Amino acid sequence: MSPRLQPMDNRSLAETFEAIADLLEIQGEIIHKVLAYRRAAESIRGLSRTAADLWRDGELRTIPGVGEAIAGKIDELMRTGKLDFFEKLKRQVPVTLVDVLRVGDVGPKKAARFWKELGITSLPQLEAAARAGKLRSMAGMGERSEARLLESIAAWKARQSTRVSIARARPVAASLLERLRRLPGVAAAEPAGSLRRWRETVGDIDLLVAADRPRAVIEAFLAFSEIDRVRGQGDTKASVVLANGLPVQLWVHPPAHFGTALQYATGSQAHNVRLRELAQERGMSLSEHGFKLKDGRTVECGREEDVYAQLGLPWIAPELREDRGEIQAALAGRLPGLVTADDIRGELHAHSDWSDGAASLEQMAEAAAAAGLEYLVITDHSKSLGVANGLTPERVRKQRKEIEALQRRLGSRLRLLHGTEVEVLADGALDFDDEILAAFDLVTASVHSSLRQSRPRVT
């Protein structure tokens, strides 16, 4: 590997395999090959370690869904920064077609038709063709189809310009924080804002760093390869947009008042207002720089715990900071704890390699038992969801026998139950008849298709 070449991070690696899966699906590749790349991408996104560390330690095969072939591709990406297989695939299928798949109502087969019949290779081209009425020349496409497609494109654009899910933002933030913590002179680096409070969605990714030389940190940060453009910068702050479109705000504070800065930047605004009111009641004022006492002295807090202690409060977990009674509860000594992994007794929805999961029934059961779970329900997809290798009634019966045999081997270590994620069809019927459904321990229903029907019909 070149001395200058940084090993690919988990996000970029997962996105590469997701793009490969999309292009293969457009190309008409067999579903099992497509799913192999999707499973690998999903596993990489969920890693607690970096794939680069696993690669250095020769442990790529420990990643669920990563066999010899995909491990070899990860090795090539880590060593060279590119993948010959992917480059060849992009010469066969325009990579910009991947964006077309992000739009509702457009699957791989339809994207391939747009490309082969009309020469459409990107989302802007698809939108222009729909507005010009050109899609109607294709069999099965009419004026209503074009109108629905334009609605879907507009909805997709709206999603891109608003908040993003925490599932997308947190891995990106974790990767940036890992690199920031390795910079010379950095004493601490933490997420802030709605990301740290674990809100379902976030606007900007807010990051805080404790360092005595903020300019050096800002300059190093702006050199990160993930950054697409700089929206603004100063001696202690930088605002950027990443190559994946996510906006990031970075603040650098002296370690001496990092605690108050982190508390302030974490929010929520309503929670912070309550804290400032509490400080005023105690004859102080509170800002991101610390407490100011009546005699003019300033109390700096290097740790967030010290901010709350100065107000006579225990530390309040970020997840609770929404001004929903948490400060009153803290004052009364009744602050609730957070749900932890130890509170989870079982898993009610799990997919195995019988459909679109990555692990076998035995692997999943052993992992659940090792994690201390009491029960696990296997809920693979039903027959109509072909893209996920849904189970036919015959395969359901075979799977049940395997689960029963596995339960006998497990004994009291784990209760293994048989369920299904049954597809709700376009007419509202379920994918299995009542007799088959009655034999399951648990049935969960889901909708993956026909989502463009009217609201009353689809609900």
Image (spheres, rainbow, N blue to C red):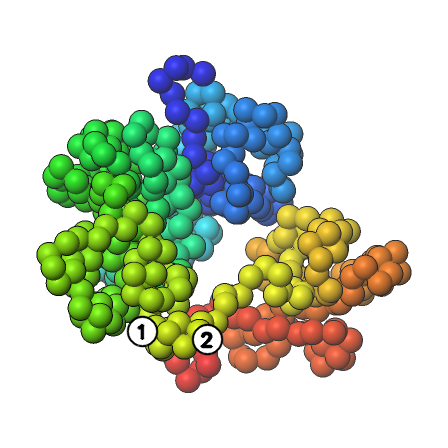
Q: In which quarter of the image is residue 252?
A: top left
Q: Residue at x 69, y 74 (%)?
A: 442
Q: Residues within 10 Å of mark 1 (few under 14, many from 20)?
A: some
- Residue bearing the label numbered 1: 323
Residue depicted at 39% across the width and 57% down the height: 166
Report the amino acid beneath label 1: Asp
**Toward the viewer: 116 or 355?**
355
Q: Write the residue at 72% across / 81% down.
A: 434
SS of the residue at dot 2? loop
Q: Where residue 27 appears, x then y in whole percent? A: 49, 41
Which class describes the residues within 10 Å of circle 2: few (<14), some (14-19), or many (20+)?
Answer: few
In this view, the residue in front, 51 or 109, is 51
As shown in the figure, which amino acid type bears the numbered disc 2? Answer: Arg
Quadrant of image for the N terminus: top left
Whether pointer 1 and pointer 2 mark residues with C-beta atoms closer than 8 Å, the reply is: no
N-terminal of the pair, mark 1 or mark 2, is: 1
Which disc number belongs to residue 334?
2
Relative image position of residue 128 (x, y in whole percent): 22, 53
